[in-house]
Amino acid sequence: MGADHLSGAAMLRIDGLRKAFGEKTVLDGLAFEVASGEVVSLLGANGSGKSTSLRCVVGLERPDGGTITVDGVTAKPGEAMPTVAMVFQKIHLVPRRSVLDNVCAGALGRLGLSRSWSVLAFPREVQAEAMACLDRVGLADRAREKAGRLSGGQQQRVAVARALCQRATVLLADEPVSALDPAASEQVMNLLRSLADDDGLAVAAVLHQPNLARRFSDRILGLAGGRLVFDSRSAEVTDETVASLYRPALEALEAAESAESAESAEMREYA
Amino acid sequence: MTDLTKAPEPRLDIPPRFRPSGVATAVAITIGLVVVHWYAAVQTNTSPKELLEGWRGLWNFLFGVDRTYPNGKTIHQDGAFPLDLRWSETIRPGLEYCLLTIWIGLLGTTLSIPVALFFAVISSRTTNRFAPLWLTGRAVMSVLRAIPETVYALMFIAAVGFGAFPGVIALAIHNVAVMGKLWSEAMDEVDQGPVEALRVAGASPAQSAAHAVLPAVMPSLLGLLLYRFDTNVRSSVILGTVGAGGIGFFIKTEVDSFHFDTMMTYVCMVIVLIIVIDLFSAWLRRKVGTV
């Protein structure tokens, strides 16, 4: 499905991914690929499985079936991959810790407990690497400030620096700009774009803003009901295509509302 | 257009606030509670009559009484008031006993910190995802907590004799269980976001505990620690009465020798001590930013 236009070999490859929470099927055989140097946006209504698919890749959810490979290495279900980093809508820094300590935490996966039991134990070379990552996102001068004192957009860039300090080759972003104002959103999206262009990262971002998706990504994936419904170059995605993604959800909402009002009418009669 | 100045025509019935089944339940619960309390009052001889008859004894205890013995002699038995305010015989030793009580509470709290932290970390689902281990942690703390400090003190006094040291050990063991539980609950309530973020970065549970959970909960842990210090000083007064040193021990000794005035002086000193510790702990908790 449209894999012919990939620039390089697929860095992240997801195939036949399935996941159900109880009765509800969230991922129904989802398949897509992201190449190095490419930014891919995932669009879809709430519950279409965008976030769940990313959470499966990083081991925060255990998929019921399907395979995930990163640079040819197959992921074990429910386990983190050292080469895959993620940034979140709610950013998830430790507000009380300094910016630098937050970035150093990205290196925890390759540090033994003797070099990571406390921030005081972080080796100098890890701190130096974290400073370089902070410099990459333009916040080296804020290293010793408490993370909680930075603005939302700056905090999200610190989270990106933490991902870089993990030495990831794949960066997943779960609604990275939903909590940010337009200017900060622009900055963060520019940063993601540049990480793909200049550093060759494979970037996959769940977005709720079709315009940002079109402007900053190479490809847009449309998800509905846990399946891929389109995979197109950003320029080829029309407003109509995007609107069609949300239409079933709207209809479902209206159906649910009318069912509810019928129910409450019944309740009234009963009373 | 609706005319907002007029009351709207009633169209909907107001749903009833109480359902008949709810009223029946409430009546049944009320009757049940009354019966249980009546039975408890019978079993404990609690009645207005007992209270009136005890009044005389209480008065004598507070203000003294002249007892006439069969041989015709009358002896005055001192009551709790006026207080015994002799400096070198009562007040100065009392202050020393109060300090000892504080030292018992302080050491009992501080010595329990490492073990309490260990139990808190293994018993919180945030920091330990291995179910058998956190079930074990919780079970051990429940058992330790089920035994009151006083019982621990009695056991250690039996083992090592009267004194402040068995009091310290008793407090420390009980406090491991109580503070461990409070701390693990504080950790349970921590925002899971940073924990997940570090898991994605490949952090082990111990690393997540050190770098996501502990920094987030540190002010709560400190607040709970101060609260436990406050409580442990109170407890150490009680432990004294069973022989574990401090002001409590001397309250008990004075009661046993019918020196009610000295005893009441010590009780007043305990009141001041507890209020001072309480204010100090509240002030310090405000300083560290928790309540």
Image: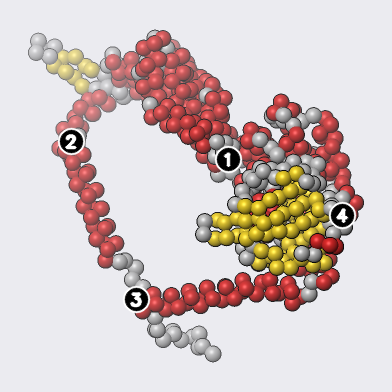
Say which residue label 2 marks. Answer: B43
Vertical comparison of B189 with B162: above or below? below
- Between disc 4 and disc 3, the foreground one is 4
Q: Which mark is residue B126?
A: 1
Q: Amino acid at mark 4?
A: Gly
- Which of the pair A94/A173 is nearer the observer? A173
On the image, the x and y values in percent for residue A251 come to 59, 76
Using the numbered discs, state the Cα–Cα distance from disc 4 to disc 1 in whole angstroms. 40 Å
Tag 2 subunit: B
Q: Which mark is residue A8?
A: 4
Q: Amino acid at mark 3?
A: Tyr
Name the secondary structure under disc 3: helix
Using the numbered discs, state the Cα–Cα distance from disc 3 to disc 1 in whole angstroms. 46 Å
Q: Is disc 1 on the same chain as disc 3?
A: no
Pointers 4 and 3 in contact (C-beta within 8 Å): no
Using the numbered discs, state the Cα–Cα distance from disc 4 to disc 3 in whole angstroms. 65 Å
Pointers 4 and 1 in contact (C-beta within 8 Å): no
Q: Which mark is residue A270?
A: 3
